[in-house]
Image: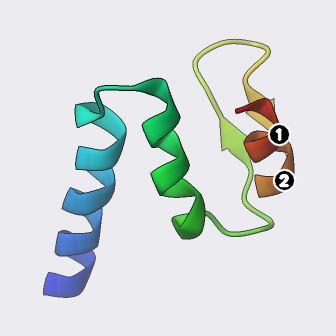
Amino acid sequence: MQDVCDLTKKLWRIYYMSKCEDCIEDLFPYIDEQCVIVGTGKYEYYHSKKKFVRHY
C-alpha cells in the first residue's frame, strides 16, 4: 500500500508542482497506452495516450 501512496505523491508533485508546461512529459511513462484522459474543457478528451502525447 505504501508503494501506491508514494507513486501518487510523486505523480501529484510532477503535475501540480511543475514550474514549466513541458514538465508534464515526465508523466508520460506512467500513462497506459489505452488510457482515456478527460480534462476540464470540452476539447480536452483523449482516447489514448498517443493522442494525449500528440497534443503536448
Residue furthest to the left:
2
**Location of residue 35 in the rendering, given as x and y in whole percent from the top left corner:** 72, 59
Residue 1 visible in the displayed image: no
Colouring convention used in this rendered image of the protein: rainbow
Amino acid beneath label 1: Arg
**Location of residue 38 in the rendering, given as x and y in whole percent from the top left corner:** 67, 34
CA separation, marks 1 and 2?
Answer: 6 Å
Dot 2: element: helix
Left or right of residue 11: residue 9: left
Query: Do the CB atoms of the residues marked 1 and 2 lie less than 8 Å apart?
Result: yes
Amino acid beneath label 2: Lys
> Which residue was labeled with disc 2?
50
At 79% from the left and 15% from the top, the residue drawn is 43
Considering only vertical position in the picture, is 13 above or below 40? below
Count up the numbered dots: 2
> Which residue was labeled with disc 1?
54
Asked where in the image residue 18 lies, by quadrant, the reply is top left
**Location of residue 11 in the rendering, given as x and y in whole percent from the top left corner:** 33, 56
**Location of residue 47 in the rendering, given as x and y in whole percent from the top left corner:** 86, 47
Specify the quadrant that holds the C terminus: top right
Left or right of residue 7: residue 43: right
Front one among 48 and 56: 56
At 74% from the left and 45% from the top, the residue drawn is 53
